[in-house]
Image (cartoon, rainbow, N blue to C red):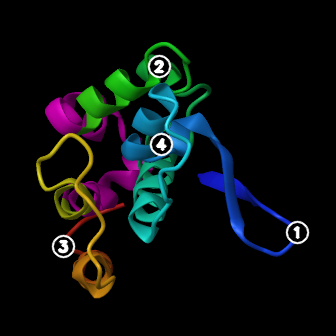
Amino acid sequence: MASFRQDKKGKEQRERITGTIKYMALELLKAIKKKENTLKQTYRHDLGSFFYVLTVGCMSYGRESAPEHLHQWSSASTRLEAKGYHIQTQFRKYIINYFTPMFEGIKELAWSLREILFEDKWMGCGTPKEPDVLYDPIIRAFDDTIKKLEDGKVFN
């Protein structure tokens, strides 16, 4: 997740983008790489960060260590390119196939969230003015997954 400092009057001050690199939105990573500290953080970046927390958790929980390729998401030299490649180009190979068995029922949700958030674009999808454009399909995806889990149509 990313954050930024506030001055004494509570106004946002973008001296630098801070946060946990592994969970940062691709657009924020791109801004860091280009030293563009003025990029405004939006709710879309927060949704992207949530997506990364969810997928990393599904790949790591219950293992002695996280899958090796996830270390690239924290590396200063390869984080942006590696994460973009894993999410956009090789999602099944590097993400879905590494979900631990206890998260089998979440795979379809991860696919749905990826489609909603990235629309098959690598980065810079922009932030819709109306949050419901993203929130509504995300909530529907969660509701659908919960219903399938409750009905026994997917297994955990």
Considering the numbered disc 1 on the image, is that residue within a helix, a strand or a loop?
Answer: loop
Category of crowding for the residue at label 4, using alpha-carbon neighbours closer than 10 angstroms: few (below 14), some (14–19), many (at least 20): some
Determine which of the numbered discs, if any, sits on residue 153 in the image: 3
**Lateral position of residue 100 relative to residue 66, left or right:** left
Residue 142, compared with residue 96, is above or below; it is: below
**Lateral position of residue 151 relative to residue 99, left or right:** left
Category of crowding for the residue at label 1, using alpha-carbon neighbours closer than 10 angstroms: few (below 14), some (14–19), many (at least 20): few
Which residue type carries mark 3? Answer: Lys
Q: Which residue is mark 4?
A: 56
Residue at 83% in and 75% down:
9
Residue 99, compared with residue 44, is above or below; it is: above
Which residue type carries mark 2? Answer: Gln
Residue 128 is one of the magenta-drawn residues:
no
| Magenta residue span | 88-111
Q: Which residue is mark 2?
A: 72
Q: Which badge, 1 or 4, comes first in the chain's sequence?
A: 1
